[in-house]
């Protein structure tokens, strides 16, 4: 699948039909209009119909789309997410489905033109017919399929039919013929997912439903070209520095017949010619390379370290005096290294961009909908901007989902989010036969070529958790050894070889977690680590502080979404408790509710009602992840990354997410904005009972600041206060204050005090934190009195709050649509705190005031 842009007659066209973005590209398009004809691409996404195989009537279909969403749009099924409808819709994946399009091709008989159909995503087992002739058999959701159809097209009424076979029924006979079964512990039904090159999460997961889709899930195009066309433009960054960038532009050209040609490389933004070559092209595919130097290049940086500068290069091919095609590619120039060097703790695991070690602050990303065609560019932007606004700089595209749409990576480039990219294999063993491996080879090549020019892509990773599953989930003991041989064929030979051939500038990592076979995959000395003793193992949150990874790529804890989200899939009867049948249908982890209750009993009193339980579960989740994340940040550079599980949801559900299906921020996301602050103050008590105040500075600049520590009684009295000046070095974590806890408490019990710490720089608080010394249920706090005042400005409303005593996880709510810039925050006595609310639509101050509710954690309990 091409993510570059092709110049076509008078307009520049992308696979999503975006408009011209640069005048230089428009100028190049004008040249084609005057002097020649580029390859023409016509969308075939409109006018489709579908039906169940064996039935008569056709219904309107959307392309891109899925059978499930088409049935929903035609009112043939109820909302799959509502109540427990999921279980009544499993029949859909057991049926076969057909899609049909009738289209005209006015220039079907144009002499000299080649024509092909391009299917960017067929899900999954499909036979394709054009005018009753079979032209393609597809068997991989993740591949792009191209078929030459020039001899079959006619000017009018071409019929294109795609027959999809059930992805479940297709595999069951193959499984029955084997004397073993590939492990697939997350499949919520027949365990067919390992045999099918299809999004694993759609077979069910412990946070997602089972909706095994079929359909045309990405665009369909009719491409016409003559003599020569450009298939790809790859920008290889040979040597990049602030002073000079040496790059190689590799142009892949397909030619009908051998011919003399000229190839030109331009700066698409300015129209400036960078290089040109005259050469003889041979029939078939040709690679033409240009070596270019750029003085004082504008470099691309992750967010927080510099600007996200992008270049656009354009290649043009001409045969004789006639231009035949042009193609452009956007990329960012930077160096990116996964640095692994021996040190006092083992071997480092840190991402270094333009020479700067970057502490990766982020989360794991799953597909934003179980029906991925419903995720628009606008939703991608909303979700990814939320991650950036919460001070994240990396997102891991987890291997049980999909290779995301081009828009996802374009926005990651724009926002400065590094992308840890898994190949789509997760928590299963996979076949190792020749046909399967060749299928994966084509899949990997398609997606590497599609994504490799995005500066945000930081790493290619073979799979999620399969190496550790083989060693630690009893798979090795309970399965034949050839499964491990097949694993090595796929993840230790095939995929690294393809990465080396098609994207040699990036690191390949075999699995997550992994030590690259130099130690146990869960080693604390080398590689990345997943830690699930908190949650799955039931261990207390404090266990996080006993773990010292090199890079923590998974850890997490569940919570429930907002009441508004729960209301979207329930009736009032369903909301009598978290154990009602419908609430259980939206809790996919078999022990999820039990574990939430267990941890809540350790930390909190019993919530007083259903809504309070939802709220308390979010605070519980946020407090646990805060404790772990701050520890992992404090031990930098021993640890150089935290990607908690998980960023988002694919449907409304109780899960580990920080944002729910609708993009609503849970408490965890608001906490994230604070514990991922580039400069963080972190108070804690060490094993000797000493209070320590650590300051973490992830930025590339020294910070001159004042550190202020206050000790408050729960009734609001200030018991102690310390101020000190500090020069906080860049890229560092240091202890700035250490005091005897007994001295600071001034004779008061731990249950009576709250410790507050903040960093002030240039008269601005850049990080504020608090510490309680016992579980919240043991704190002898009374319900606080919170006063507030509302003012308005051009952006919205400011809510200024004061509290008479320490107040925890204070939540602001409004029935007016909009968003609070901060929330679930702590209020300390004697301090005014301002929170901005940005309404979606014009709203009066009086209406906003009437709608506003403010609750603290104390309000959740009787």
Image: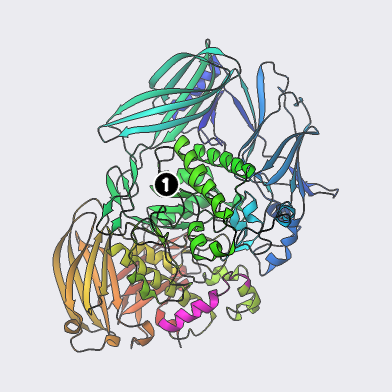
* Residue 503, x across and y down, in percent: 44, 37
* Coloring applied to the structure: rainbow
Q: Is residue 849 left or right of residue 45?
A: left
Q: Which residues are magenta?
A: 585-604
Q: Is residue 278 left or right of residue 361?
A: right
Q: Which quadrant holds residue 277?
A: top left
Residue at 63% over, 55% down: 193
Q: Residue furthest left?
A: 725
Q: Secondary structure at mark 1?
A: strand
Residue at 60% over, 40% down: 438
746 drawn magenta? no
Q: Is residue 822 visible?
A: no
Query: In the depicted view, which residue is nearer to us: 637 or 621?
Result: 637
* Residue 222, x across and y down, in percent: 66, 31
611, above or below 83, in the image: below
677, above or below 846, in the image: above
591 drawn magenta? yes
Q: Is residue 629 left or right of residue 762?
A: right
* Residue 24, x across and y down, in percent: 43, 26
Q: Which quadrant holds residue 283?
A: top right
Q: Is residue 203 visible?
A: yes
Which quarter of the rendering shows the N terminus? top right
192, above or below 756, in the image: above
| Picture mark count | 1
Q: Is residue 57 left or right of residue 141?
A: right
* Residue 718, x across and y down, in percent: 21, 82
138, above or below 394, in the image: above
Number of other residues with Cα within 10 Å of mark 1, as a class: few under 14, some 14 to 19, many 20 or more: many
The residue at which mark 1 appears reads as 459
Q: Kindly report the secondary structure that dominates the magenta region of the rendered protein.
A: helix
Q: Which quadrant holds residue 542?
A: bottom left
């Amino acid at each position: 699948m091409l993510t570059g842009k092709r110049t076509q007659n008078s307009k520049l066209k992308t696979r999503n039909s975006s408009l011209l973005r640069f005048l230089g590209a428009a100028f190049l398009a004008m040249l084609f209009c005057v002097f020649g004809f580029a390859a023409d691409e016509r969308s075939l996404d409109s006018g489709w119909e579908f039906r169940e195989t064996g039935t008569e009537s056709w219904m309107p279909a959307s392309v891109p789309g899925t059978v499930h969403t088409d049935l929903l749009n035609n009112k043939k099924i109820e909302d799959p997410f509502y109540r427990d409808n999921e279980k009544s819709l499993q029949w859909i994946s057991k049926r076969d489905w057909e899609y049909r399009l009738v289209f005209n091709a006015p220039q079907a008989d144009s002499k000299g033109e080649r024509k092909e159909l391009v299917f960017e995503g067929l899900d999954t087992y499909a036979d394709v017919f054009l005018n009753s002739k079979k032209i393609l058999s597809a068997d991989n959701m993740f591949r792009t399929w191209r078929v030459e159809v020039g001899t079959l097209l006619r000017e009018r009424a071409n019929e294109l039919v795609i027959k999809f076979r059930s992805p479940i029924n297709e595999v069951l006979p193959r499984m029955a013929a084997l004397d073993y079964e590939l492990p697939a512990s997350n499949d919520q039904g027949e365990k067919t997912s390992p045999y099918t090159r299809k999004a694993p999460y759609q077979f069910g997961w412990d946070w997602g439903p089972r909706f095994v889709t079929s359909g045309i899930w990405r665009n369909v195009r009719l491409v016409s070209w003559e003599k020569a066309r450009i298939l790809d433009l790859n920008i290889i960054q040979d040597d990049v520095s602030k002073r000079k960038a040496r790059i190689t532009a590799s142009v892949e050209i397909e030619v009908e017949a051998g011919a003399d040609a000229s190839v030109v490389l331009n700066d698409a933004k300015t129209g400036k010619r960078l290089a040109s070559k005259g050469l003889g092209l041979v029939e078939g595919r040709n690679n033409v390379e240009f070596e270019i130097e750029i003085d004082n290049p504008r470099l691309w940086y992750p967010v927080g370290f510099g600007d996200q500068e992008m270049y656009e290069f354009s290649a043009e091919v001409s045969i004789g005096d006639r231009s035949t095609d042009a193609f452009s590619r956007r990329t960012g120039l930077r160096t990116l290294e996964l640095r692994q060097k021996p040190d006092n703790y083992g071997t480092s695991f840190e991402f270094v961009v333009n020479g700067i070690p970057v502490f990766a602050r982020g989360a794991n990303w799953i597909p934003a909908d179980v029906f991925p065609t419903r995720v628009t560019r606008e939703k991608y932007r909303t979700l990814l901007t939320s991650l950036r606004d919460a001070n994240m700089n990396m997102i891991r595209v987890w291997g049980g989902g999909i290779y995301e749409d081009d828009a996802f990576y374009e926005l990651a480039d724009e926002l400065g989010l590094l992308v840890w990219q898994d190949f789509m294999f997760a928590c299963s063993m996979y076949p190792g036969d020749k046909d399967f491996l060749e299928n994966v080879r084509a899949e990997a090549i398609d997606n590497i070529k599609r994504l490799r020019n995005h500066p945000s892509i930081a790493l290619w990773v073979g799979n999620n958790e399969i190496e550790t599953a083989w060693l630690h989930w009893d798979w090795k003991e309970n399965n034949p050894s050839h499964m491990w041989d097949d694993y090595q064929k796929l993840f230790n030979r095939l995929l690294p070889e393809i990465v080396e051939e098609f994207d040699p500038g990036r690191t390949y990592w075999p699995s997550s977690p992994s030590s690259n076979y130099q130690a146990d995959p869960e080693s604390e000395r080398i590689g990345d680590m997943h830690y699930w003793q908190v949650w799955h193992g039931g261990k207390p949150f404090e266990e996080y502080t006993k773990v010292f990874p090199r890079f923590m790529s998974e850890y997490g804890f569940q919570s429930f979404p907002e009441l508004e989200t729960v209301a979207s899939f329930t009736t009032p009867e369903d909301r009598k408790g978290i154990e009602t049948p419908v609430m259980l249908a939206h809790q996919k982890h078999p022990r999820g509710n039990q574990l939430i209750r267990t941890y809540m009993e350790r930390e909190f009193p019993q919530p007083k009602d259903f809504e309070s339980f939802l709220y308390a579960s979010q605070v519980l989740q946020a407090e646990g992840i805060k404790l772990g994340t701050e520890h992992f940040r404090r031990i930098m550079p021993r640890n150089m990354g935290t990607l908690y599980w998980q960023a988002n949801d694919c449907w409304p559900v109780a899960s580990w997410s920080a944002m729910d299906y609708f993009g609503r921020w849970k408490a965890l996301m608001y906490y994230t904005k604070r514990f991922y602050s580039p400069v963080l103050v972190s108070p804690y008590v060490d094993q000797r009972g000493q209070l320590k105040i650590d300051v973490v500075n992830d930025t590339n600049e020294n910070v001159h600041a004042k550190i202020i520590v206050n000790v408050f009684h729960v009734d609001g009295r200030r018991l102690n206060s310390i101020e000190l000046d500090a020069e906080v070095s860049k890229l560092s974590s240091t202890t700035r204050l250490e005091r005897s806890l007994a001295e600071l408490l001034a004779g008061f019990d731990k249950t009576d005090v709250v410790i507050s710490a903040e960093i002030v720089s240039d008269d601005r608080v850049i990080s504020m934190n608090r510490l309680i010394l016992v579980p919240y249920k043991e704190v002898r706090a009374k319900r606080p009195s919170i006063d507030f005042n509302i003012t308005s400005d051009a952006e919205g409303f400011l809510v200024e709050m004061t509290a008479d005593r320490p107040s925890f996880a204070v939540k602001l709510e409004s029935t007016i649509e909009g968003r609070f810039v901060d929330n679930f925050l702590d209020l300390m006595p004697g301090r005014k705190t301002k929170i901005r609310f940005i309404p979606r639509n014009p709203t009066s101050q009086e209406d906003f005031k009437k709608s506003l509710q403010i609750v603290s954690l104390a309000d959740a309990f009787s």
